[in-house]
Image (cartoon, grey):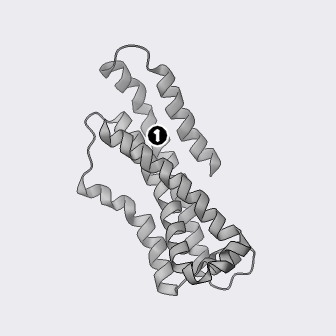
Amino acid sequence: SSLCRHSLGLLFAAIALDSLAMLLIWHEGLRFSLESASPISITISTLALTSKGPLLYLFIKTLTTPNFSIKPIHALHALPFAAAFGIVLADRLTIHDIATTLDSDIRVISSVYWWTITRATPVAYAVASIISLRHMKALYDSHYTGDESHYAYWIKFLTFGFLFQW
């Protein structure tokens, strides 16, 4: 379906953004040279780290739930981003605050909360996605003909790989 393809595409875009975010956080020279762009860097980082999990879950739900469609209640999946970004705004966190937190020089305790949200979100959604995979075999058996088992293994590999990466 179109929603399935779009959610997978957005998941891969979020993974690419995550790589950019890690570069902005960990590359000290780049971080300091882009100091004036810190609000953009922290926004990209927050979005990348908190969107991958919900996008993986959305993709899995499109595969495991017949006639799945987006409903207003699904906006709740944006709560991790809203919480992490709310912390950024409330304490005016910069990309430097985030990076120094991991260097054991905690200057702003809210950066620890930011890291907790951005690291826990993908794990929680990976677990929820794995639970949703239980329904995939029954769905394929009842709705499809032919051998889609190779596709099912690819989806399971992607989901478990996502969990193990975190």
x and y percentages locating residue 132 in the rendered image: 42, 39
Quadrant of res 112: bottom right
Q: Is residue 148 above or below residue 64?
A: above
In the figure, is residue 137 to the left or right of 27?
A: left
Q: Amino acid at mark 1?
A: Ile
Quadrant of res 106: bottom right
Nearer-the-camera pick, 164 or 10: 10
Quadrant of res 29: bottom right
The local secondary structure at tag 1 comes to helix
* Residue density around tag 1, few if under 14, some if 14–19, many if 20 or more, within 10 Å: few
Residue visible at 47% across and 49% down in the picture: 11
Image quarter hosting the N terminus: top left
In the figure, is residue 136 to the left or right of 70?
A: right
x and y percentages locating residue 152 in the rendered image: 48, 27
Residue visible at 53% across and 40% down in the picture: 159
Q: Is residue 36 above or below residue 158?
A: below
Q: Is residue 152 above or below residue 94?
A: above
In the figure, is residue 94 to the left or right of 101?
A: left
In the figure, is residue 148 to the left or right of 21?
A: left
Residue visible at 59% across and 64% down in the picture: 21
Outermost residue, right side = 104
Q: Which residue is mark 1?
A: 131
x and y percentages locating residue 13 in the rendered image: 48, 52
Residue visible at 58% across and 81% down in the picture: 94
Q: Is residue 46 above or below residue 133?
A: below
Nearer-the-camera pick, 34 or 153: 34
x and y percentages locating residue 40 in the rendered image: 51, 75
Nearer-the-camera pick, 54 or 127: 54
Asked whether the viewer can see residue 145, the reply is yes
